[in-house]
Image (cartoon, grey):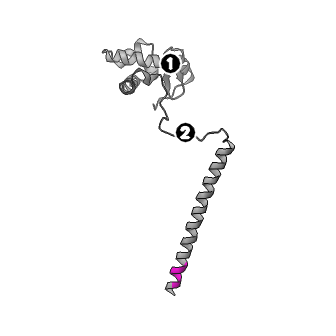
Amino acid sequence: MSKLIFNDIQMKLLEKNPNVDHVSERSISYTSDFKLKAVKENLNGKSPTQIFIEHDFDLKVIGSTKPKECLRRWRKTFKEFGEEGFTTERRGKASTGRPSSTPLSVEANLKKAEARIKYLEAELEFLKKLDELERQAAKKKR
């Protein structure tokens, strides 16, 4: 994330650009069309700075290193996922996500409860055995 912090005027200026999807105080989200267009132009020989200037970005506002950083990231995405890399959401694919907020069916609740009971019974049995072994060890020491 950039160390730049955009003020309200800069944010409004950036939001007017058709290649910008969203702007916050600390970040700019670009449209997927712009990202794809920029990568293709870059692969055809245009410099990142030249691409951003031609698409009406003020480098004094976004920073002179921003184009190079963005294009580096976007080229990697393009190389790895192709054009779909800019249109599909990939964050969190490997994570299981938050637990479902939808209520479970009666059968699912019953299954879950039975599994928990089985686990707790096994844990209790283990603790009883451990307690017995500790008592036997204490008797031997006497």
Residue 57 to residue 94: above or below: above
Q: Which amino acid does label 2 sit on?
A: Gly
Residue 107: x %, y % from top left: 66, 45
Using the image as rendered, state which of residue 91 and residue 116 is in the foreground.
116
Q: What element carries label 2?
A: loop
Tell me the CA gap for discs 1 and 2: 29 Å
Ranked by sequence position, the earlier of labels 1 and 2 is 1
Q: Of helix, strand and loop, which mostly describes the magenta segment?
A: helix
Residue of label 2: 97
Using the image as rendered, state which of residue 94 and residue 64 is in the foreground.
94
Residue 62: x %, y % from top left: 45, 22
Residue at 54%, 14% in the rendered image: 16
Query: Which residues lie in the magenta part?
Result: 135-139
Left or right: 103, with 87 as reference point: right
Residue at 58%, 70% in the rendered image: 128
Residue 82 to residue 94: above or below: above
Q: How many labels were placed on the picture? A: 2
Q: Is mark 1 on a helix, strand or loop?
A: strand
Residue at 48%, 16% in the rendered image: 19
Residue 91 to residue 50: above or below: below
Classify residue 123 by image quadrant: bottom right
Residue of label 1: 20
Q: What residue type is labelled 1?
A: Val
Name, please, the residue furthest toward the right.
Answer: 106
Residue at 39%, 26% in the rendered image: 81
